[in-house]
Amino acid sequence: MECVVQGIIETQHVEALEVLLQGLSGVPKERVRVHELCLKSGPNLGVVPSEVRLLCDLAQPTPSWTIRHVGGAMRGAGAEQISVLVRTIVESKASKNVLQYFYTLGYKLDHELLKIGFAFRFHRGAQITVTVTSANKMPRLHATDEAVPVTPGIQLVEITAPAAADNYNDVVSAVTAFCEYLAPLLHLSKPGHSTGIVATAGAAAASLMSSGGGKTL
Amino acid sequence: MPPVKWLMHWHPSPGATLNTQILAEACGCAESLGGAKDGRWKTSIIFYRAMTRDGGAAGPAGQQGQQHGDLPRELLGVALHERPGLYFSIVRLAKLVLQADATFPQVMEKLQSYKARVALNFEGFQYQLGDFCLRIGKCVPNNSEVLRGIMMEVEYYPLSSIEKSRAIMEDFFDVWQETVAKKSLPGHFIHVESNFSEYGLSDQYSFQHTAVQYATCLQQLMAVVRG
């Protein structure tokens, strides 16, 4: 399981967000360059239609592949009341022939994206990962070198934290608490419930940049 | 890089049946060669069958419902004893071997496109013999003691190159065959070489090579049962 919230930020304020995250986390940022391929089961394959994501980490000297299955969100009255989405996630590293493997199994490429940006991984009540990326589309199949932004000027911010059935309440609290620190710059909510950019972002960013980084936080 | 390994299976003489006595005798041979027993091992193979929405069977050999010739009918999942954190999936028809984590079966379970049906365990004792490691075991279905086959792994620690180790592996196999022959058992061990290059695997031995060898060995054992 994982807890997740998402938000968007204008590219012009990303540097301020980075300063803020650096100050809050105290860890160096990691470069993110991930080629994400979303595959769907072909007609008639499987008891139900299914979807699997293959992530190729291009930030490493040798690209590495991960298979990711994103399950359904937790439902019920309790889940409605919290501002964080709790969902099942299963991941497995895989050898580089994984795309060919899923094609052979009868899966088809639905779409692909190149996500470029940075991430901070740190512990703050839970193991939190904040990624800030721009989504890029490829004009030709797999042509990651020619990728262009899907939403120029806007970047996606995602906060995730691993959770288990017996501790997700604590993780939700930790993620919610962390989101409040970012509130002047962006608003984070459950995926699919985007609330747009934040009006105070410009002023907050200016304040952050003029304060000389995260030192004063 | 893991050391090179050969898998061999027991081929019973015509009319002879498999029994655990052969396994005990093979273990006796390992000990008579000076092998020191140092533990147990278990490798598992799981058969996955394609699931289709109309209840048909995938692949050319589908027996019921509508057929879907473009889908592989069957996948093999291999969990090797020496690398419990890894999992291998083999599509024999397409000559594909995927290396993944031990969480891979959970991914397959979520996808519900291929369903785990039957599991076979290869299990037995391990012997250290100088630079060699011998693992002699039986093949039995999960939750059953019905003997489906007898097989062994021979590992040669100093080398990872299949070609460079060929001569020494062949020499060892000859010695092994002579030792087993002295027992006058109704059958003999056979090494069926897997075609690694078909799977895109190089001369440098890897765990994927072992997974492919298990698939080959399984095919041979099934052929013996059917024959």
Image (spheres, helix red, strand yellow):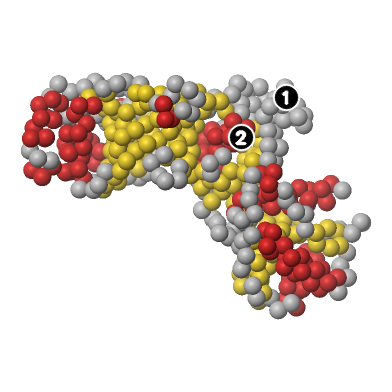
Give the camera-side residue of B51 and B177.
B177
How many neighbours does mark 2 have within 10 angstroms: few (below 14), some (14-19), or many (20 or more)? many
Seen from the viewer's position, the closer of residues B82 and A138 is A138
Q: Is residue A79 left or right of residue A180?
A: right
In the image shown, does A2 or A202 lie closer to the viewer? A202
Residue A22 in which image quadrant: top left
Q: What chain letter is assigned to the residue under label 2? A: B
How far is disc 2 from disc 1 in space, using C-alphas? 15 Å
The relative height of residue B203 versus residue B198 in the rendered view (above or below) is: below
On the picture, is A25 further left or further right than A5?
Answer: left
Residue B206: name its quadrant: bottom right
Kind of residue at disc 2: Tyr
- Residue at numbered disc 1: B67
Instruction: Report the residue at 46% width, 28% height from top.
Output: A143
Which residue is located at x 68 percent, y 27 percent?
Answer: B70
The residue where tag 2 is placed is B114
Residue A176 percent location from the top left of the image: 23, 36
Image location (x, y in percent) of residue A35: 43, 33
| Residue A36 in the image: above or below residue A129 | above
Under mark 1, the amino acid is Gln
Residue furthest to the right in view is: B15
Q: Give the image location of residue A207, x and y in percent.
A: 8, 32
B8 sits to left or right of A87? right
Q: Chain of mark 1?
A: B
Q: Earlier in the sequence, mark 2 or mark 1?
A: 1
* Whether residue B207 can be seen here: yes
Could you tell me which quadrant the C terminus of chain A lies in? top left
Secondary element type, mark 1 = loop
